[in-house]
């Protein structure tokens, strides 16, 4: 079963998606999946998992660092899941580079190299924005690069975490 819920945020509306047991998607306006029926979403009572996700995001946008105690079920390839696992390990208020994640995966796989560009592709296809913190990944030398929801949103999220981490 598919469930969805729209919530307000300082960065525009956010679409939350679930299969009723886990969170499957968090999308900013302008990045919603093409097949979502927004009229149906607006008229439905969200299941508990989506209410909990909204409460988590509300606390996050209030400058808190809430514990992530929600079941997540992003759809993706095995490689994407491997990359997303590293995203979940990036501490609140910190950033890592695509190259750093690539090195971690190369070490884990016992191979000489992993492409930072391949990692970037997996990061960019993350369907659970904010909670799986793809915004905490930056380019070489800390340069802000790529964010599916727009660099302005990435800057906002990093500034929010920086303020809450001081």
Image (cartoon, grey):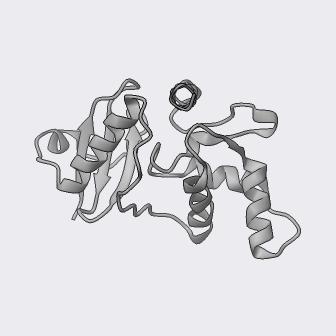
Residue 93 rendering spot, x and y as whole percentages: 58, 37
Residue at coordinates 49% horizontally, 51% vertically from top-left?
132
Residue at coordinates 40% horizontally, 64% vertically from top-left?
73
Quarter of the image where one finds residue 104: bottom right
Query: Quadrant of the image for the N terminus?
Result: bottom left
Horizontally, residue 155 falls left or right of residue 55, namely: right
Q: Is residue 128 above or below residue 57?
A: below
Quarter of the image where one finds residue 86: bottom right
Horizontally, residue 155 falls left or right of residue 13, namely: right
Q: Residue furthest front?
A: 166
Residue 79 rendering spot, x and y as whole percentages: 63, 67
Horizontally, residue 75 falls left or right of residue 86, namely: left
Q: Nearer the viewer, residue 94 or 116?
A: 94
Residue at coordinates 69% horizontally, 55% vertically from top-left?
119
Residue 23 rendering spot, x and y as whole percentages: 34, 57
Query: Quadrant of the image for the C terminus?
Result: top right
All told, the count of numbered labels is 0
Q: Residue furthest bottom?
A: 110
Horizontally, residue 128 falls left or right of residue 136, namely: left
Q: Nearer the viewer, residue 92 or 31?
A: 92
């Amino acid at each position: 079963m598919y469930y969805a819920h729209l919530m307000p945020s300082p960065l525009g509306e956010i679409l939350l998606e679930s299969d009723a047991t886990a969170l499957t998607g968090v999308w900013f306006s302008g990045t919603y999946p093409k097949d979502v029926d927004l009229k149906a979403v607006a008229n439905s009572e969200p299941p508990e998992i989506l209410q909990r996700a909204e409460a988590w995001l509300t606390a996050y946008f209030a400058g808190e660092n809430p514990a992530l105690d929600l079941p997540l079920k992003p759809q993706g390839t095995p490689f994407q899941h491997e990359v997303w696992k590293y995203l979940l390990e990036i501490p609140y208020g910190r950033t890592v580079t695509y190259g750093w994640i690539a090195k971690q995966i190369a070490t884990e796989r016992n191979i000489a190299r992993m492409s930072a560009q391949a990692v970037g592709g997996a990061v960019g296809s993350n369907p659970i924005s904010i909670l799986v913190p793809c915004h905490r990944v930056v380019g070489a030398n800390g340069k802000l690069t790529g964010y599916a929801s727009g660099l302005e949103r990435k800057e906002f999220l990093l500034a929010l975490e920086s303020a809450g981490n001081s």
